[in-house]
């Protein structure tokens, strides 16, 4: 069936809930309202209010409660309405969800999925455009996932719900409804921890994830017209990184351009750049390059375009690397 | 019975007063064997706690948070547990652990700096103690929501201290508990200090228990140095939770006789007169006097109890000290169910380095 990313998420939730009665949803407005983006639309009618739980406004309470539920044997999927509101739950995520397996030597674990929309580009309010995935990628015990297509969204979300450790599932807001794709009706998993070569190329590796995938795709199409063959790497899992796929690609092309919308400093691009330099430096034809959001607060909608890497900016970066 | 005591008016639930006189109409009429058992558990807690302090001073244990003074609230409440109830404890809860049957060896092991000590044995449901203050509260509510979902018919107890009531997680958890009518018992050890910060400055509320009213459930202000009151209050709250009648908050009015931890000197922020006043209310003494007056306690019994406690403690120390440090792999392998490649590479690097150094 042709589905957009949001519908793919809804379908993944519905199918996994039907398969496994331990899966329960909780969050603000996820029940009767079906979520502010409608990701959980209709699920309360199918599964009832004991499995689709509208909670009071309390992010730390939601994640803390989800940890307790997970330890008790359920498989909660918690929604944080926007990534910009997740910070009050940091203590629960970092000090507890990520550590419980280790703290108890495996006696208690946290099979928990935290879904949250992230990223700019939809002209939203303040605090609704954050892209702070790197904050989570540094935390041992967390797994960070971000799909860029409806197909991957469904498969990765199902895999996340069957995963035995906490997963931060980042949904690119900009891609929620932007395109449709043929998505298999049956449940399936896209394995966590595997990047995907979206398009093969030989001159340079464009490495991105989430909403930036559509930007690098456009840039690569423009580059193609100028005779530059770019390989597109969609990381899909941001932590732990699929180092093998990433490094293989860079070894082949000899150039790596990382594109992310998060601020540059200590962004995931820095980690990727270090990794490439440490492991395949002698294969490089040009320095690893980053095109990213600025190290500034995400601007309000009128200025949003200055912040966000555009296909033109990426194309310019590609050309510079080829000329280096 | 607890609803007869209005925390807004500061009405305190007490069975044994400070002079160990029994309010006979409230007597839970425990069997002599139970009374003796409870006393010996209090003595064991005190002995094990004192030993931990000594071990720390001798460099055989890391920083430790002593329980001295809180034996009645810990032991009394724990004695009302069922085997299937869950506990979300905080970091000063030795009596709970001892009563519920957590191996003392493991409790020591954790404070000696070995993670293996926090692995709760199968068959017991004790969450690892929370260090970030108050963070265990929402988790206990989640477990209780899951218990409701599963119709498990159990209670989930969460312990914390007066300081935790100022944390946002306290509010979020209490609010969830009221809204979802969870089988929680929130046991607040009102021990008068959060490190140096006095209870009076923690909140302008008259009692802490009264806060429960704002969340739509019962709070009760209990004499936390009266073990009978603690037992009866906990028992009633636990039974209510198991029966699906919702949460309760118990404020155990007590005093942290010891320093906050072994790294602290409480003399800096509280005067010795105050401590002396509270020492007169020592929960262990009060219960001993009660048992003596009742004709249950004598010197011979005391000697037996002390010897048994000392023996158990010594054995636990010996066992804990004979546990080898964690294997290097163990530091890595519990981060995820399946070790990611980057972690196995880091482990290999570290192993290679140690091998080079001949270790």
Image (cartoon, rainbow, N blue to C red):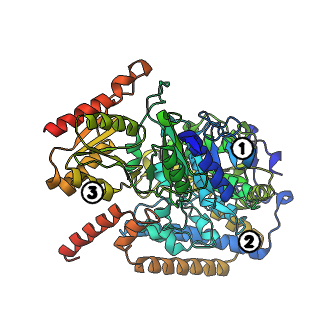
State the residue at coordinates (26%, 39%): A290
Discs 1 and 3 carry the same chain letter: yes
* Residue B357 left/right relative to A140: left
Mark 3 — on which chain does it sit? A
Dot 2 lies on which element? helix
Residue B286 coordinates in the image, percent (x, y): 68, 62
- Distance Cα–Cα, label 1 vs label 3: 45 Å
Dot 3 lies on which element? helix
State the residue at coordinates (61%, 64%): B96
Residue B65 coordinates in the image, percent (x, y): 48, 59
Image height check: is A169 above or below B26?
Answer: above
Alpha-carbon neighbours of circle 2 within 10 Å: few (<14), some, or many (≥20)? some
Task: Please give the residue where the numbered disc 2 appears in the rendered image.
Answer: B35
Task: Please give the residue where the numbered disc 3 appears in the rendered image.
Answer: A248
Task: Please give the residue where the numbered disc 1 appears in the rendered image.
Answer: A44
Q: Which mark is residue A216?
A: none
Q: Is residue B289 visible?
A: yes
Q: Tell whether label 2 touches label 1 (CB within 8 Å).
A: no
Q: Is residue B131 visible?
A: no
Residue A190 coordinates in the image, percent (x, y): 49, 55
Q: Out of B359 and B214, give the one closest to the viewer.
A: B359
Q: Out of B139 and B294, give the one closest to the viewer.
A: B139
State the residue at coordinates (27%, 34%): A225
- Distance Cα–Cα, label 2 vs label 3: 70 Å
- The quadrant in which residue B307 appears is bottom right
């Amino acid at each position: 069936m042709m589905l957009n990313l949001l519908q793919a998420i809804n379908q993944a939730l519905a199918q996994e809930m039907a398969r496994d009665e331990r899966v329960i949803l909780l969050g603000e407005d996820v029940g009767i309202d079906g979520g502010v983006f409608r990701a959980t639309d209709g699920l309360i009618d199918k599964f009832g209010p004991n499995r689709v739980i509208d909670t009071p406004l309390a992010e730390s309470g939601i994640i803390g409660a989800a940890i307790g539920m997970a330890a008790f044997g359920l498989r909660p999927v918690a929604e944080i309405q926007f990534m910009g509101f997740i910070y009050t739950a940091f203590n629960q995520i970092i000090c507890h969800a990520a550590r419980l397996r280790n703290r108890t030597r495996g006696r208690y674990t946290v099979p928990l999925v935290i879904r949250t929309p992230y990223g700019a580009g939809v002209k939203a309010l303040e605090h609704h455009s954050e892209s702070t995935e790197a904050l989570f990628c540094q935390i041992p015990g967390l797994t960070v996932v971000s799909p860029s297509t409806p197909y991957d969204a469904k498969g990765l979300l199902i895999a996340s719900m069957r995963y035995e450790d906490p997963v931060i599932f980042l949904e690119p807001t900009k891609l929620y409804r932007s395109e449709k794709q043929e998505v298999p009706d049956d449940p399936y998993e896209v394995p966590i921890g595997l990047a995907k070569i979206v398009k093969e190329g030989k001159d340079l590796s464009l490495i991105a994830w989430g909403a930036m995938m559509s930007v690098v795709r456009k840039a690569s199409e423009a580059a193609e017209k100028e005779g530059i063959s770019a390989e597109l790497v969609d990381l899909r899992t941001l932590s732990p990184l699929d180092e093998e796929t990433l490094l293989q690609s860079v070894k082949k092309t000899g150039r790596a351009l990382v594109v992310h919308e998060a601020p540059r400093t200590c962004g995931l691009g820095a980690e990727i750049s270090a990794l490439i330099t440490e492991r395949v430096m002698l294969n490089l034809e040009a320095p690893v390059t980053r095109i990213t959001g600025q190290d500034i607060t995400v601007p309000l909608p009128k200025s949003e375009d200055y912040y966000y890497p555009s296909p033109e900016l990426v194309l310019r970066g590609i050309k510079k690397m080829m000329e280096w | 019975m607890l609803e007869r005591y209005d925390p807004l008016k500061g009405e305190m639930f007490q069975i044994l007063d400070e002079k160990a006189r029994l309010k006979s109409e409230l007597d839970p009429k425990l069997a002599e064997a139970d009374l003796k058992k409870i006393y010996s558990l209090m003595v064991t807690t005190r002995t094990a706690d004192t030993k931990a302090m000594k071990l720390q001073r001798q460099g055989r244990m890391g920083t430790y948070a002593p329980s001295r003074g809180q034996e009645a609230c810990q032991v009394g409440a724990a004695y009302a547990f069922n085997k299937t109830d869950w506990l979300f404890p905080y970091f000063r809860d030795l009596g709970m652990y001892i009563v519920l049957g957590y191996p003392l060896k493991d409790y020591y092991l954790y404070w000696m700096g070995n993670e293996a000590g926090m692995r709760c044995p199968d068959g017991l449901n004790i969450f690892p103690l929370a260090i970030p203050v108050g963070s265990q509260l929402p988790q206990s509510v989640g477990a209780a929501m899951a218990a409701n979902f599963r119709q498990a018919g159990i209670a989930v107890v969460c312990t914390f201290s007066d300081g935790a009531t100022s944390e946002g997680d306290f509010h979020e958890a209490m609010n969830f508990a009221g809204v979802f009518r969870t089988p929680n018992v929130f046991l607040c050890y009102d021990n008068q200090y959060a490190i140096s910060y006095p209870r009076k400055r923690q909140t302008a509320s008259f009692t802490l228990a009264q806060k429960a009213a704002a969340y739509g459930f019962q709070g009760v202000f209990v004499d936390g140095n009266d073990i009978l009151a603690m037992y009866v209050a906990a028992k009633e709250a636990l039974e209510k939770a198991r029966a699906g009648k919702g949460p309760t908050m118990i404020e155990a009015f007590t005093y942290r006789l010891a320093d906050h931890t072994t790294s602290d000197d409480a003399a800096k922020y509280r005067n010795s007169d105050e401590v002396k006043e509270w020492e007169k209310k020592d929960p262990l003494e009060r219960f001993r006097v009660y048992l003596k007056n009742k004709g249950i306690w004598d010197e011979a019994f005391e000697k037996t109890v002390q010897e048994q406690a000392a023996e158990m403690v010594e054995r636990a120390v010996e066992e804990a000290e004979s546990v080898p440090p964690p294997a290097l792999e163990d530091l890595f392998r519990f981060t995820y169910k399946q070790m990611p490649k980057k972690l196995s590479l880091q482990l290999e690097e570290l192993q290679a380095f140690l091998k080079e150094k001949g270790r």
